[in-house]
Amino acid sequence: MTHIAVIGAGQAGSALAAKLRALGYEGQLTLIGAEPVPPYQRPPLSKKYMSGQMELERLFLRPESFYAEQGIDLLTGTRVSGIDPETMVITFADGTEMPVDQIALTTGADPICLPPVMGGGEGVYTMRSLADADAMAHEFTPGRRVLIVGGGYIGLEAAAVAALKGLEVTLVEMAPRILARVASEETADWIKTMHGSHGVDIREGCGLQGLSKSAASFSAPLSDGTALEVDFVICGIGVRPGTALAERTGVEIDNGIKVDEFGRTSHPKIFAAGDCASFPWKGARIRLESVPNAIEQAEATAASMLGQGAPYVAKPWFWSDQYDVKLQIAGLNSGFDDVVVRPGDKPGTQSHWYFKGAELLAVDAMNDPRAYMQGKRWIEAGQSPEKAVLADMGVPLKSVPVMSTETV
């Protein structure tokens, strides 16, 4: 009987293991997770879970009984220290070993922490795991002061939860503006204005220069010459792909674990999927940190491990919930040179359309699901709307003329 081990029990790992069974794999199947809980959703941690709108049980991707029913050996609280690529033997942190026939690495991503010179310890948090969210839950008390370092989506989502809970929120972003790596100035300005209306102090082009802790608070000098007194700090300055185990194994790394269109690494019996993996896409190599990609790539990789695979073609889409706004994103905006702004049908709704020349690359839709869905359909169909007509609110989206991307 063959034995497949899936190392990493997050969204991708859970999806990959379940898909193996759904595709008819009958061999031994082990899903290994370092965290002491069954696989769970990460996006709600900085949104509904922290705000108290989602209970712990609702975070879990599947009931724990699912894994036993499917014959999946779920090992929680279990760390893998090494893989022998020649013998395909997995070594655990406690020294025990497990021989396997194939391995899927779904090791996710790890939060980037403040450098030690900045200070840290109790009262300084990252936002990636359930343990992170639980550790800072007691801090969210009205009137307390929080400094959020990093103006990406994680930091902004945490800022929204804190503001709604009545905290005094300051967010600093070292780059000239928030969301500098992932969104246009139009989207960043729209979101900054929204946060300002909820009392969040966003300081762009402003870095944290250090942290000094007293008995009950932190002194946080900033590069703009001011110093804040805050009660706790959340670090949201990004993540790194979880490649440490793959590197020790000798698997090739390229902005993550390098895989081909079938999820195969440089080792013929080791595959990878999810946030940890980089893969070919439209003549380039990308790595996507999103739930849809984690699931879809993992399921495609499961098929490849059984010899049933087809090349994985990503259809990028993302979302972010902040206050009463749902930001939905379709496509990837890399290389855009123009943004078309289209107001929505209702107040407080808007969409931003990214173009490279005449080609539609992506759309950001703020509380505008119609724009998101239409943009997603156009992008996936390889179609691009005429920019001048798209900007005309007098023309319904469905009536905007489009042309094939191949002719753009």
Image (tube, rainbow, N blue to C red):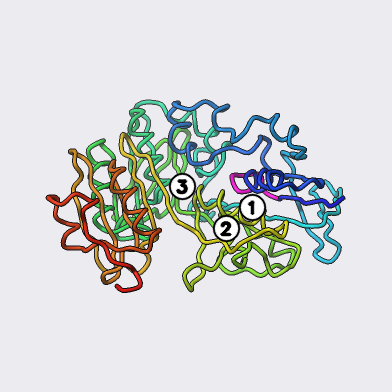
- Give the SS element for disc 1: loop
Number of the front mark, 3 or 1: 1
Q: Name the foreground residue: 101 vs 201.
A: 101
Please name the residue shown 52% across and 61% down the image. Answer: 313
Image x and y of residue 341, in percent: 20, 55
Q: Taking 357 as reference, is 232 left or right?
A: right
- Give the SS element for disc 3: strand
State the separation of the CA atoms marked 3 and 1.
21 Å
Image x and y of residue 356, in percent: 30, 69
Which circle marks residue 235 in the picture?
3
**Tag 1 residue:** 107
**Tag 2 residue:** 241
Question: Of marks 1 and 2, which one's residue comes earlier in the chain?
Answer: 1
Q: Taking 185 as reference, is 320 left or right?
A: right
Q: What kind of residue is marked 3?
A: Cys
Report the magenta residues as a range: 7-12
Q: What kind of residue is marked 1?
A: Thr
Which circle marks residue 31 in the picture?
none
62 shown above or below 368: above
Q: Taking 175 as reference, is 269 left or right?
A: right
The picture quadrant where one finds residue 52 is top left
The picture quadrant where one finds residue 278 is bottom right
- Give the SS element for disc 2: strand
Q: What kind of residue is marked 2?
A: Pro
Please name the residue shown 37% across and 58% down the image. Answer: 182
